[in-house]
Image (tube, rainbow, N blue to C red):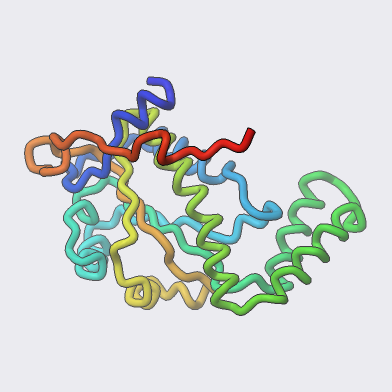
Amino acid sequence: MNIIEALNWRYAAKRMTGKTVPESIINQIIEAALLSPSGIGLQPYEILIVTNPELKSKILPIAFNQPQVTECSHLMIFAAWDNYTEDRINNVFEHLNKIRGQESTVSDRQRRFAIDYFAKFTQENNFHHAAKQANIALGLAVATASLNGIDATPMEGFDAHQLDLLLDLQAKGLKSSMLLAVGYRDTELDWNFKLKKVRKPLEEFITEFK
């Protein structure tokens, strides 16, 4: 499938078979997320991957008992930085300089801009900004899964605070922002499977300024 065919094929699978997705495909999905763009290249998020059945069962009520949480092959938790700090930004640029083999002065202007820019905002605003960056990665993960014939259902319906407590995310300076259930659709049990895909008319979606 090309990307348009793949996105037409995909839908938000509500029931999954429990079949395991091959690690080679999971690795592609992860790499696509890793390569996604982010503001100033900071990548202010991490992905936690849950395959343990017992942990999935604990997450199930936190996600309002949506069955794909336990039926999926891999449950991916996108967790954003709870704040942009000077230490975190410095660490990003130290890594960048090391990989590029350059002196720190080369990237210092951009590093200083990032520190000063995010210092102007509240911690809550910075978290929301980081969560939006994580959503870009999630979108590419969904597209990559679809190109491989794998279902990937984004899920915002969960108690983020309770999930953060369960996984002790605050110890890592993270807050959960989205879930992504990756697996295989159950076409017999899923009420959503037979419904026609609906999107708004293109003329209501696009405004051109020529």
Residue 110 located left or right of residue 149: right
Horizontal and vertical percent position of residue 14: 19, 48
Which of the image's four quarters has the N terminus?
top left
- Is 81 placed above or below 136 here? below
- Is 14 placed above or below 207 here? below
Residue 163 located left or right of residue 39: left
Image quadrant of residue 148?
top left
Q: Residue at x 12, y 43 (%)?
A: 190
Q: Residue at x 56, y 63 (%)?
A: 130
Residue 16 located left or right of residue 74: left
Horizontal and vertical percent position of residue 15: 16, 46
Q: Residue at x 68, y 68 (%)?
A: 88
Q: Which residue ends up furthest to the front in the rendered image?
A: 210
Residue 108 located left or right of residue 122: right
Horizontal and vertical percent position of residue 51: 30, 53
- Is 166 placed above or below 133 here? below
Count of picture labels: 0
Q: Is 208 in front, or is 36?
A: 208
Q: Which residue ends up furthest to the left in the rendered image?
A: 188
